[in-house]
Amino acid sequence: MGVPFTAAHGSIRFSLSVYNTEAEVDLVLEKMPAIIAKLRAMSPFWEENL
């Protein structure tokens, strides 16, 4: 992605196309908060873990 390691470590890249459905996007939006919380808990760069 061309960004520094610490920025990339806290980034998620999504690629969409005309073949993705609204239901697929809604599913990702539903699941992502729990995934993000888990990743933040594991990250040495997240402020709460410093």
Image: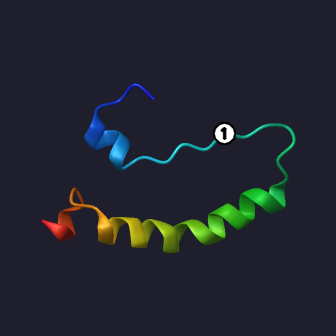
Q: How is the image coloured?
A: rainbow
Between 25 and 8, the one nearer to me in the picture = 8
Local crowd size for mark 1, using a 10 Å CA cut-off: few (<14), some (14–19), many (≥20): few
The location of residue 39, given as percent across then percent down, is 39, 65
> Within the image, what quadrant is residue 7 found in?
top left
List the residue tagged with mark 1.
15
Q: Nearer the viewer, residue 49 or 30?
A: 49
Q: Amino acid at mark 1?
A: Ser
Place of residue 29 in the rendered image (x, y in percent of width and height, measured from the top left)? 64, 64
Q: Is residue 5 above or below residue 10?
A: above
Q: Residue at x 31, y 68 (%)?
A: 42
Q: Is residue 35 above or below residue 25?
A: below
Left or right of residue 36, residue 48 in this image? left
Q: How many marks?
A: 1
Q: Residue furthest left?
A: 50
| Residue at 29% over, 32% down | 4
Residue at figure coordinates x 50%, y 69% from the top left: 35
Q: Is residue 37 left or right of residue 25?
A: left
The quarter of the rendered structure image containing the C terminus is bottom left
Q: Residue visible at 35% across and 30% down? A: 3
| Residue 47 left/right relative to 40 | left
